[in-house]
Image (cartoon, grey):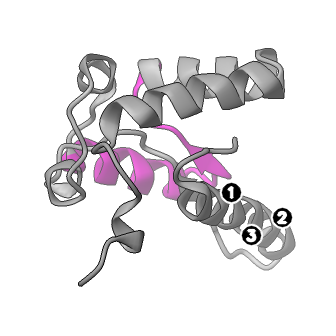
């Protein structure tokens, strides 16, 4: 899905998913397994380092790094194309990418990103960075 306010980040994620799915299909007949892992929020220091505010909903969707690694490995060994750890994350992916029209999806993502960002220009526009 698209992500206003973090367009390059969301586009990069979409690229990785698309590329991995293509590789998965191309390499399957050669016995090579390729799996993309799409974990949603993971309990790392990323949010603090990126100066993002914690969101209550994100906390409900968080998955531990160990669980992401375990489920990703298990999915790879099972030959799965994609692994989305956590039932909450699976529901979000389904709702946002399959059921919700793109316009409301963009609005929802933008409003969520605005709540997390510092006021003012994006970090990369600030002087001295």
Q: Which residues are magenta?
A: 65-87
Q: Is residue 67 visible?
A: yes
Q: Is residue 79 magenta?
A: yes
Give the camera-side residue of 66 and 54.
Answer: 54
Q: Residue at x 76, y 72 (%)?
A: 23
Specify whether 12 is left or right of 62.
right
Where is residue 111 shown, x and y percent of the image? 51, 26
Up/down of 95 relative to 8, above or below: above
Instruction: State which tag comes first along the sequence, 2 or 1.
Output: 1
Judged by depth in the image, the label closer to the viewer, 3 or 2, is 3
Quarter holding the C terminus is: bottom left
Which residue is label 3 attached to? 19
Which residue is label 2 attached to? 25
Q: CA distance from mark 3 to mark 2?
A: 10 Å
Instruction: State which tag comes first along the sequence, 3 or 2.
Output: 3
Which residue is label 1 attached to? 14
How many badges with numbers are in the image? 3
């Amino acid at each position: 899905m698209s992500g206003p306010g973090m367009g390059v980040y969301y586009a990069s994620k979409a690229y990785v998913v698309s590329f991995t799915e293509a590789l998965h299909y191309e390499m399957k007949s050669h016995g090579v397994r390729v799996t993309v892992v799409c974990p949603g929020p993971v309990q790392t220091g990323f949010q603090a380092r990126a100066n993002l505010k914690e969101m209550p909903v994100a906390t409900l969707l968080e998955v531990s790094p160990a669980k992401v690694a375990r489920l990703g490995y298990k999915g790879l060994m099972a030959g799965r194309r994609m692994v989305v750890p956590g039932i909450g994350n699976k529901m979000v992916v389904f709702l946002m990418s399959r059921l919700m029209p793109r316009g409301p999806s963009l609005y929802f993502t933008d409003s969520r990103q605005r709540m997390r960002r510092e006021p003012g220009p994006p970090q990369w526009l600030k002087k001295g960075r």
